[in-house]
Structure formats: C-alpha cells, structure tokens
Image (cartoon, helix red, strand yellow):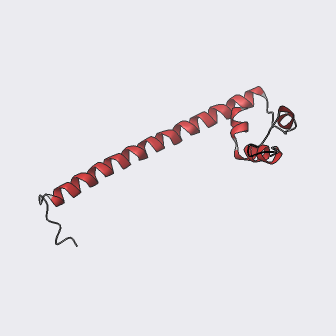
C-alpha cells in the first residue's frame, strides 16, 4: 500500500479528486475509497516489496557514494585553490 500510494500516478489522481474551496485543497476518505488500487496476492506483494526495498537500497547507496565523491572533490578544489593562491603550485602555464 505504501509504494502504491506513494506512486506519482496515485498522487496525481488524488490531486485531481481534491476540491479546492480555499487556498488548501480538501480531500476526504470517500475520495480515497473510490480510488482503484491494484491488489495482487500476498505472496506477490511480498515479492514486490522485497524488490522495491532492494532497488531503493541500491539507489540510496549510489546517492551516498556520489555525495561522498562531491565532498571529496570540493575538498580537493579548496586545497588546490589554496595552494595556487599561496604560490605552492604554479598555474601560470596551465592557462
């Protein structure tokens, strides 16, 4: 249910059903009750959740690695600028 209700298509469908009488759209339980939800068997649901959890884990790991690489590159950039400014490296011929 979590993955289904978090999906973009479900969120879009809810947005279309929400009525806006003020600045805050209104959505009630009857709107949600009328939504068509896929309902696979419990076994298939468990397989889907396991697959999605694994994929989410891999994506989270890739994001973590990319963030670490960005941090290291920022540190390297800072060190390189510092060395160029203090004259520890000569960058005149590199330009």
Q: Residue at image x 88%, y 37%?
A: 34
Could you tell me which residue is drawn at 57 percent across and 38 percent down? Answer: 56
Residue 21 figure quarter:
top right
Q: Is residue 7 above or below residue 49?
A: below
Quadrant assignment for the N terminus: top right
Which residue ends up furthest to the front in the rendered image? 22
The quarter in which the C terminus is drawn is bottom left
The reply, left or right, for residue 5 in relation to residue 32 is left
Q: Residue at x 20, y 70 (%)?
A: 94
Figure check: 93 above or below 81: below
Q: How many marks?
A: 0
In the image, residue 57 sits, relative to residue 71, either above or below, namely above
Residue 52 point in image, percent of width and height? 63, 37
Location of residue 81 in the rendering, given as x and y in whole percent from the top left corner:
22, 57
Q: Residue at x 17, y 67 (%)?
A: 91
Is 65 positioned to the left or the right of 49 in the image?
left
As rendered, which of 66 and 48 lies closer to the eye?
Answer: 66
């Amino acid at each position: 249910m979590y993955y289904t209700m978090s999906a973009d298509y479900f969120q879009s469908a809810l947005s279309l059903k929400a009525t806006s009488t003020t600045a805050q759209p209104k959505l009630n339980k009857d709107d949600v009750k009328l939504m068509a939800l896929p309902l696979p068997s419990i076994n298939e649901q468990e397989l889907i959740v396991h697959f999605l959890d694994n994929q989410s884990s891999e994506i989270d790991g890739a994001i973590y690695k990319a963030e670490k690489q960005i941090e290291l590159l920022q540190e390297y950039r800072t060190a390189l600028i510092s060395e160029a400014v203090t004259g520890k490296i000569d960058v005149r011929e590199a330009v």
